[in-house]
């Protein structure tokens, strides 16, 4: 049985195919992150992961380099995602690990006896602000990672076809992700400052 692409793909322009690819990868990245959140951990693992993340945040706040540290970490990971074909696998592994860390931190925070008291002390306006900042950070990071992973596949395909112009598009997309991740790092550092 021969594989056939759906008609919406066959009839689409190259630009539209890139948009479809990006949207599919974005959905896949979110699903992989959720799978990572659902990976079971022990309470000891939850505490170790949370302590490690908290120490990184504290060090960044103390030295005044929190936003820079976040940017360097996220941009380095995103650059790996641009590697032809293998970058897509690296990216999905990174997103699985991201979900794993998020899940461990959530479970740890919810297991603390003062979790309900801490949550009740947050004002509605602060809660809304923190949620809005988290949403902006999520959008900036997940859009960047989805761009990197989808371009990894496009770059592999175009280079095998000896269509070198794709390198120009890759450079432009790397620039776009740098801007998005800079914005995300600044917003995330500000949000962590509020916490």
Image: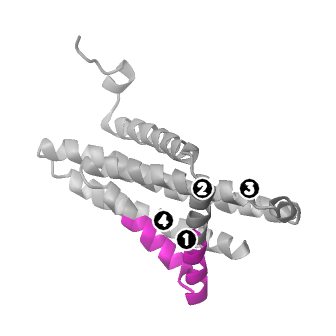
144 shown above or below 34: below
Q: Quadrant of residue 121?
A: bottom right
| Secondary structure at numbered mark 3 | helix
- Residue 116 drawn in magenta: no
Tell whether position 71 is magenta: yes
Q: Secondary structure at mark 4?
A: helix
Per the rendering, the mark at residue 52 is 1
Q: Pointers 3 and 4 in contact (CB under 8 A)? A: no
Q: Is residue 58 visible?
A: yes
**Residue 35 image position (x, y, % from top left):** 52, 41
| Magenta region | 53-76
Q: Distance between the Cα atoms at labels 2 and 4?
A: 24 Å
Vertically, is 139 above or below 52? above
Sequence-first tag of 4 and 1: 1
Find the distance from the CA under tag 1 to the CA under tag 3: 17 Å
Taking the spot 67% from the left edge, 59% from the top edge, the residue there is 108
Question: Which of the two discs, 1 and 2, labels the residue nearer the N terminus?
Answer: 1
Q: Residues within 10 Å of mark 3 (few under 14, many from 20)?
A: few
Residue 139, by quadrant, is: bottom right
Residue 125 rendering spot, x and y as whole percentages: 84, 63
Residue identified by numbered label 3: 110
The Cα–Cα distance between marks 4 and 1, rounded to whole angstroms, is: 22 Å
Residue 86: give its label.
none
Q: Quadrant of the C terminus?
A: bottom right
Observer-side mark, 3 or 4, equals: 3
Q: Which residue is mark 2?
A: 104
Q: Secondary structure at mark 1?
A: helix
């Amino acid at each position: 049985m021969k594989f056939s692409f759906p008609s919406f793909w066959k009839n689409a322009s190259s630009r539209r195919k890139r948009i479809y690819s990006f949207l599919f990868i974005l959905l896949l990245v979110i699903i992989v992150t959720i799978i990572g959140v659902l990976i079971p951990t022990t309470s000891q693992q939850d505490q170790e992961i949370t302590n490690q993340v908290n120490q990184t945040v504290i060090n960044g706040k103390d030295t005044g380099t929190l936003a820079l540290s976040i940017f360097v970490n996220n941009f380095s990971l995103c650059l790996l995602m641009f590697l032809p074909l293998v970058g897509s696998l690296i990216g999905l592994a990174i997103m699985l690990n991201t979900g794993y860390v998020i899940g461990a931190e959530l479970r740890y925070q919810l297991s603390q006896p003062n979790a309900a008291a801490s949550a009740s002390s947050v004002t509605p306006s602060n809660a809304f602000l923190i949620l809005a900042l988290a949403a902006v950070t999520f959008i900036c990071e997940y859009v960047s990672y989805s761009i990197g992973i989808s371009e990894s596949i496009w770059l592999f395909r175009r280079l095998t076809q000896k269509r070198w112009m794709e390198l120009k598009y890759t450079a432009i997309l790397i620039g776009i992700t740098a801007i998005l991740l800079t914005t995300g790092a600044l917003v995330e550092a500000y949000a962590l400052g509020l916490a």
